[in-house]
């Protein structure tokens, strides 16, 4: 019977649009699931959405929707979660929404079971609460008085609540972390033990009464289950634990690995095993805490306007190129600095120059010299053995890295072979062999060796670029039987009478300058969209006494003439009738917003008794009044124009 492999991603919290950071983890899990299927495992790959909690309730209210309507739009709507995973070719076997009925009922049963066992009890909670993270914190856990996860303000909160006896499991969890390979990479263990377990694990508040968008505690109305208890058990309810919708729990549980971002390692490596211990369930084999994709050292966030849109990148560069880039460029366990330059370089160097070139040169020469089908005779020499040995032993090196979730290293191994094959072309000079009729057998040998190397590399690249690899297999005429894991370390699997076709270019080179300019323009638009709709000038706290204010001589003025001031971009020169019988000149820096001819004849407001001021050699006697504010980062100005029936010189008071 095939070995089972159960892998999960965190279930995404759909309060905002998904970005490249979320895509990163899901693509990694997909590559792992595809790899395990390739090796013959019976894989269950789960992803989904985590849909309860105060933040969703608030967001839905802001959007004028019920929480469920709001969620349906983000999860199932156009360019929603499901659409993105489809676009990214994510091969999940199951998708859970924590609002699914079977999950809700199962969570109620699980909560009750821990309550009846005495591991959940009723108490009163006083603490610091971070609304965006849905997390209560103790004073000692705060960093500079703020949430240690997101750095935002926390507030005092107190409520009657249920507690989970986390403290009871502290020793067992510490042992699990320190003495087993449960939590990976190993570097995350110290952080968990030193920051959370050693200072003393307090019991965990696992119900809320301050909002209602959660799974009700069925034996105590008014309480909803803490969103993390609800969310973590998704990994088991989606298999059918405590429900009849699915029947895969016995087959797939415990999970072989949970992939999670580093900020939620605490929940997965401390709270999750403790709750499973309480439920007397087997523990997952591994939790892997991956790093973040960061921009200029900081996390992506909508408010910073630096969220990278996976739809835009996939559209510009192709889904497979994006999948490949994410796993080729950054080590999975640590943070990686995302940049568009890096993405374009990876595509141009690895995909266009190295892989793309190898495939097109090889298939092109088989077409050119043999009409797409090689003769069967072969003639080996030392150079061939080098390449063959490297290619045939690749699978073992690749497997060792994939088993440790080291995607970057696994891809590095493949590219060593691709580099070697490109060098082999330069060494064997098939174009020179092609000119000499007596070297036909040698030429066929060289090209066959190249085709075999491409076949092996393509098999191992399949988990990363499923569509592209299918196309390469078709180009080299690989039959189904030689696209397999079993044949990935067996030389000579490709039939020599296979039909080879060069076809279209797999990875056209990206015009770096043009692509960067397009991305930069998109980024600017995004930054602008993240700016506040309206920003006002700061209010002046200092008071002006009434008599001082009354000294301001504000009057209606008629604009008799208006023209641009020479050599100034900003200034307009106004000739005004202020009712005194003598024309008044005022300069105003509003040319950016108005053309002079549009203002002639209008009635404006001016303050007349300011001391005269010379600008560009012209004396300005007073100031016209305008209203200013900032809109999406852009300064806006409106000259205060009033009813033309107001006579020149009328005093404003
Ligand atoms: O945490 N780089 O959901 P979530 C890499 N609902 N990974 C990133 C990232 C980035 N820039 N930004 C986010 C939750 N992620 C919970 C999970 S599981 C029972 C409940 C990752 O939508 C993040 O680290 O806030 C997390 O693993 C995942 O995206 C979902 O984050």
Image: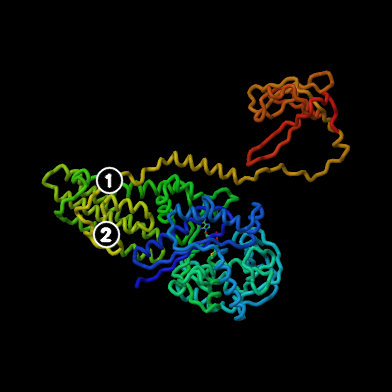
Q: Nearer the viewer, residue 128 or 142?
A: 128
- Number of numbered discs visible in the structure rendering: 2
Q: Is residue 401 visible?
A: no
**Residue 438 located left or right of residue 161:** left
Q: Position of residue 465 (x, y in %)?
A: 38, 54
Q: Position of residue 353 (x, y in %)?
A: 33, 46
- Which quadrant of the figure contains the N terminus? bottom left
Query: Does ligand 1 reach within 8 Å of label 1's beta carbon?
Result: no
Name the element at disc 2. Answer: helix
Q: Position of residue 446 (x, y in %)?
A: 20, 51
Q: Is residue 551 visible?
A: yes
- CA neighbours of label 2 inside 10 A, class few (<14), some (14 to 19), many (20+): many
Residue at 61% of width from left, 76% of height from top? Answer: 112
Q: Nearer the viewer, residue 164 or 498?
A: 498
Q: Does 551 appear above or below 16?
A: above
| Mark 2 → mark 1, Cα distance in angstroms | 19 Å
**Residue 503 located left or right of residue 115:** left
- Disc number placed over residue 482 in the picture, else none: 2
Q: Does 282 appear above or below 486?
A: below
- Disc number placed over residue 544 in the picture, else none: none
Q: Does 233 appear above or below 602?
A: below
Q: Which residue is mark 1?
A: 502
The quarter of the picture where residue 431 lies is: top left
Q: Nearer the viewer, residue 451 or 552?
A: 451
Q: Nearer the viewer, residue 352 or 146?
A: 352
Residue at 24% of width from left, 49% of height from top? Answer: 500
**Residue 536 located left or right of residue 360:** right
- Which quadrant of the figure contains the C terminus? top right
Residue at 46% of width from left, 62% of height from top? Answer: 333
Q: Position of residue 267 (x, y in %)?
A: 55, 68
């Amino acid at each position: 019977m095939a070995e089972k492999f159960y892998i999960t991603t965190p279930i995404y919290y759909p309060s905002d649009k998904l970005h490249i950071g979320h895509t990163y983890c899901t693509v990694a899990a997909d590559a792992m699931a595809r790899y395990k299927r390739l090796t013959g495992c019976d894989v269950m790959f789960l992803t989904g959405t985590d849909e309860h909690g105060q933040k969703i309730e608030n967001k839905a209210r802001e959007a004028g929707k019920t929480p469920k309507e709001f969620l349906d739009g983000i999860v199932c709507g156009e360019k929603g979660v499901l659409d993105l995973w489809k676009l990214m070719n994510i091969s999940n076997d199951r998708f859970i929404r924590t609002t699914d009925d079977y999950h809700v009922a199962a969570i109620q049963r699980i909560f009750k079971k821990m309550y009846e066992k005495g591991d959940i009890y009723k108490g009163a909670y006083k603490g610091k609460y971070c609304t965006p993270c849905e997390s209560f914190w103790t004073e000692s856990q705060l960093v500079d008085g703020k949430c240690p996860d997101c750095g935002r303000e926390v507030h005092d909160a107190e409520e009657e609540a249920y507690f989970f006896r986390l403290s009871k499991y502290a020793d067992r969890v510490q042992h699990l972390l320190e003495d087993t390979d449960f939590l990976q990479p190993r570097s995350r263990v110290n952080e968990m033990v030193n920051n959370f377990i050693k200072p003393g694990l307090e019991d965990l508040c696992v119900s809320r009464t301050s909002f209602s968008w959660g799974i009700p505690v069925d034996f105590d109305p008014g309480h909803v289950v803490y969103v993390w208890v609800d969310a973590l058990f998704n990994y088991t309810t989606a298999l059918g634990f405590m429900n009849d919708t699915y029947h895969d729990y016995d087959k797939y549980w415990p999970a072989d690995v949970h992939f999670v971002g580093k900020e939620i390692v605490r929940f997965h490596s401390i709270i999750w095993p403790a709750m499973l211990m309480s439920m007397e369930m087997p523990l997952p084999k591994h939790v892997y805490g991956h790093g973040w994709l960061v921009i200029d050292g900081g996390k992506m966030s909508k408010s910073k306007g630096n969220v990278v849109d996976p739809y835009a990148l996939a559209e510009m560069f192709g889904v497979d190129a994006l999948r490949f880039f994410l796993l080729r460029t950054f080590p999975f366990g640590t943070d990686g600095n995302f940049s568009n330059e890096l993405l374009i370089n990876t595509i141009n160097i690895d995909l266009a120059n190295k892989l793309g070139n190898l495939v097109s040169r090889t298939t092109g020469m088989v077409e050119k010299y043999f009409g797409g089908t090689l003769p069967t005779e072969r003639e080996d020499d030392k150079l061939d053995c080098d390449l063959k040995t490297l290619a045939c032993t690749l699978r073992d090196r690749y497997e060792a890295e994939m088993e440790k979730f080291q995607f970057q290293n696994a891809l590095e191994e493949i590219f060593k072979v691709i580099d070697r094959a490109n060098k082999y072309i330069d060494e064997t000079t098939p174009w020179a062999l092609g000119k000499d009729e007596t070297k036909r057998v040698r030429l066929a040998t060289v090209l066959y060796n190249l085709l075999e190397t491409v076949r092996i590399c393509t098999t191992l690249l399949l988990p990363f670029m499923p569509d592209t690899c299918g196309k390469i297999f078709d180009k080299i005429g690989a039959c189904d039987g030689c696209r397999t894991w079993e044949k990935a370390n067996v030389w000579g699997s490709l039939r020599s009478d296979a039909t080879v076709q060069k076809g279209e270019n797999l990875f056209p080179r990206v015009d770096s300058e043009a692509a960067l300019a397009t991305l930069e323009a998109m980024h600017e638009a995004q930054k602008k969209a993240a700016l506040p709709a309206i920003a006002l000038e700061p209010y002046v706290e200092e008071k002006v006494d009434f008599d001082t204010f009354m000294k301001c001589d504000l009057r209606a003025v008629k604009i008799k003439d208006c023209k641009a001031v020479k050599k100034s971009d900003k200034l307009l020169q106004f000739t005004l009738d202020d009712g005194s019988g003598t024309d008044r000149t005022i300069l105003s820096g509003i040319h950016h917003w108005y053309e002079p001819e549009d203002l002639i004849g209008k009635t404006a407001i001016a303050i007349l008794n300011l001391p005269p001021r010379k600008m560009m050699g012209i004396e300005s006697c007073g100031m016209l009044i305008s209203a200013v504010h900032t809109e999406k980062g852009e300064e806006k100005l409106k000259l205060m124009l009033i009813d033309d029936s107001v006579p020149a010189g009328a005093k404003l008071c």
